[in-house]
Image: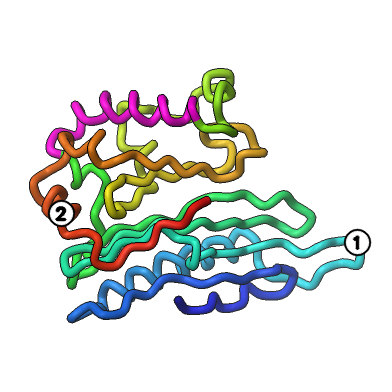
């Protein structure tokens, strides 16, 4: 883990981003992992530049919790999903996820649809699996069906933030995306046995290579 650089005046920032050791040629992979976070920070700084606070203001927030990430690293791929939060001075921080899966050693990004043998058919099954787990979530629960729909479940969009870890596919949803604000960011863990039939041979081979270096926090 590498400490996050300071955001700037007027913001409380902290945390760390992920770097993977032990790869035969990990330079491009680690560059991609670094850029995932630094580009997100740069976008935040564009929308909310650092500034001196007035006496009646309290700081904004920018935090990347790399130590709490879902992470898997093998000689073929690296996959990570990191909890993050960003809020303006005097504002309410928004919880979200930064996710990236890349090939080793190229650092080439892997999209969610790249994992699927037949994406269009897979979305139907995935929607059923994910919705069932969200309805069973102790915080989201019945609110999932009371809230206006926030995703087109027959597209790749609801599965954009993902990680592959030992024995499971992990999906992330930001604050208010699938539940009430009190739920913050929501993490859905789907056992591999429920979705393996949807995957390409390459994805199955990746999962068979785990665990070599995995991290799955209990949250």
The disc label shown at residue 208, or none: 2
Q: Distance between the residues labelled 2 and 1?
A: 55 Å
* Up/down of 43 relative to 142, above or below: below
The disc label shown at residue 56, or none: 1
The image position of residue 166, as x and y in percent, is 28, 54
* Residue in the picture at 49% in, 27% down: 136
Placement of the N terminus among the 4 image quadrants: bottom left
User: Quarter-wise, where is residue 176 in the image?
Assistant: top right
* Residue in the picture at 21% in, 66% down: 74
CA neighbours of label 1 inside 10 A, class few (<14), some (14 to 19), many (20+):
few
Residue depth check, mark 2 versus mark 1: number of the one nearer the observer: 2
* Of the pair 202 and 33, the residue shown nearer to us: 202
Q: Is residue 124 magenta?
A: yes
The disc label shown at residue 186, or none: none
Using residue 167 as the reference point, say whether residue 48 is left or right of it. right
**Magenta residues: mostly which secondary structure?**
helix
Q: What stretch is highlighted in magenta?
A: 117-136
* Up/down of 149 relative to 116, above or below: above
The image position of residue 120, as x and y in percent, is 20, 29
* Of the pair 125 and 50, the residue shown nearer to us: 125
* Residue in the picture at 48% in, 66% down: 66
SS type, badge 1: loop
* Of the pair 53 and 215, the residue shown nearer to us: 215
């Amino acid at each position: 883990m590498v400490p996050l650089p300071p955001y700037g005046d007027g913001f409380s920032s902290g945390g760390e981003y992920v770097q993977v050791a032990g790869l035969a040629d990990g330079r491009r992979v680690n560059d991609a992992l670094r850029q995932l976070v630094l580009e997100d920070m740069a976008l935040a700084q564009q929308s909310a530049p650092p500034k001196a606070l007035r006496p009646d203001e309290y700081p904004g927030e920018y935090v990347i919790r790399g130590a709490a990430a879902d992470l898997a690293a093998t000689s073929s791929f690296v996959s990570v999903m990191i909890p993050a939060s960003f809020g303006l001075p005097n504002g309410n921080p928004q919880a979200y996820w930064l996710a990236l899966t890349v090939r080793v050693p190229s650092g080439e990004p892997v999209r969610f649809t790249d994992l699927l043998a037949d994406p269009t058919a897979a979305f139907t099954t995935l929607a059923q699996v994910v919705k069932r787990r969200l309805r069973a979530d102790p915080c989201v629960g019945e609110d999932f069906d009371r809230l206006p729909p926030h995703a087109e479940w027959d597209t790749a969009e609801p599965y954009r933030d993902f990680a592959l870890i030992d024995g499971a596919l992990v999906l992330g949803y930001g604050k208010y995306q699938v539940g009430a604000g009190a739920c913050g960011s929501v993490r859905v863990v789907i056992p591999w046995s429920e979705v393996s039939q949807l995957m390409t041979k390459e994805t199955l081979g990746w999962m068979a290579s785990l665990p070599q270096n995995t991290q799955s926090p209990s949250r």
